[in-house]
Image: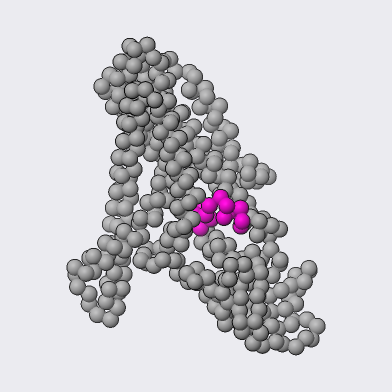
Amino acid sequence: MNLLDRYIARQYLLNVIILYLILFAFIVTIDVAVNIDWLWRIAGRREAPDGEPGVIRQAVVTALLIADYWWPKLLQLFNIMLGLVLAGAMGFTCTQMVRHREFVAVLASGQSLRRVGRPILFVALLFTVVAAVNQETVLPRIAPLLAREHDEAGKRNVDKTNVSMVRDNQGRLLYARIFDPGDNTLTDFELIERDPVGLAVKRTHGASASWDGSAWVCQNATIVPLTGGGATQTGVPVRFETDLDPISLNVRQFTSYSQYLSWRQLGQLLTKTEGGDKNVRDRLQRTRFGRISIAMTNLISLVLVMPFFIVRVPSNMASQSIKGAPIAMIALIGGTVGATAPVAGVSPIVSVFIPVIVLLPLAIAVAMSPKT
């Protein structure tokens, strides 16, 4: 990188960081303002369950609950807001350079204004790589924290839930009154095995079962034959392998949980659900390949709005922003919706790239049309 590239990259990087900080502060402030009473009461109950907590201690606990709830969310928001921040920071950077007539100096030195876009795209690509690393290594490790609600702040996992009757890849039905994601246990579970036509042939139930890494294990189960007149077995150990592991149950229980998983984990879920629910498999495929589509859409959207801000002659940048902002928003929102919404009759692996297919020719045409 020469001096010009380093200067523009530094300005753009600084604007990206500042814009992230402003948006993070705005989002957290709004959320805290709306939920402060609730969080205050939760802090009071946890600090003094049977009495009246001190105001200072309750305020400290409230602040800790807010910090504990939001630090994982901010890592998630980093990825979600990346496209918006990259486009916005580019606008601020170019506006500053137009105000100080720096584009005029670039042209006077005999260089094309397309040189201005090169360091911006380099920094944008760098942030895209950081977001990918965040998605693949950090978010999967804190996935239980991301699935929490406000009243679960301070806990290391989401609250216990029940498992409604769900079918595994072998056609068996699993039910549990309580599923605890914290220690991967099922309480009051039932496993119903069926014949090829769907009739129940055996029922296995027990007080609790735990996941040993590859199967659910219960040391004191009851097996009841439902056909053939066999004898009921009680107090027997059972071990049943199934694709309904704790991660799969979390994905089914919490709609957004799959968004926190890594590419490898999603691939493992797809392997386990082979021949299972097609809607679940399609959703996992859209989540997996949609990440690539959204990353590409973020960069394409940045290229689409560059000509509005990289101008030869100093002009009213407010009017340029009014022209470019709708295009950026439509491209970013369209890319996100296209990467997550199902398209009838189209494979999810193909449908997620429809926004890229539509926007890429426009970006190429726009990038080559400005007079620089």
Q: Quadrant of residue 203?
A: bottom right
262 falls in the magenta region = yes
Taking 193 as reference, is 244 above or below it? above
Residue numbers of the magenta segment: 257-269
Residue at 39%, 18% in the rendered image: 113
> Where residue 318 sits in the image (x, y, percent)?
31, 28
Task: Tell me the chief SS of the magenta region.
Answer: helix
Which quadrant does the N terminus fall into? top left
> Where residue 247 sits in the image (x, y, percent)?
55, 62
Q: Judge by depth and name the residue closer to the eye, 335 or 264.
A: 264
> Where residue 370 sits in the image (x, y, percent)?
44, 18
Residue at 64%, 87% in the rendered image: 235
289 falls in the magenta region = no
Q: Judge by depth and name the residue closer to the eye, 287 or 320.
A: 287
Which quadrant does the C terminus fall into? top left
- Residue 325 appears left or right of 286: left
Q: Judge by depth and name the residue closer to the eye, 188 or 241.
A: 241
> Where residue 25 sits in the image (x, y, percent)?
29, 48
Taking 371 as reference, is 61 above or below it? below
Residue at 58%, 39% in the rendered image: 353
- Residue 140 appears left or right of 319: right
Residue at 33%, 48% in the rendered image: 24
Determine the residue located farthest toward the right in the rendered image: 228
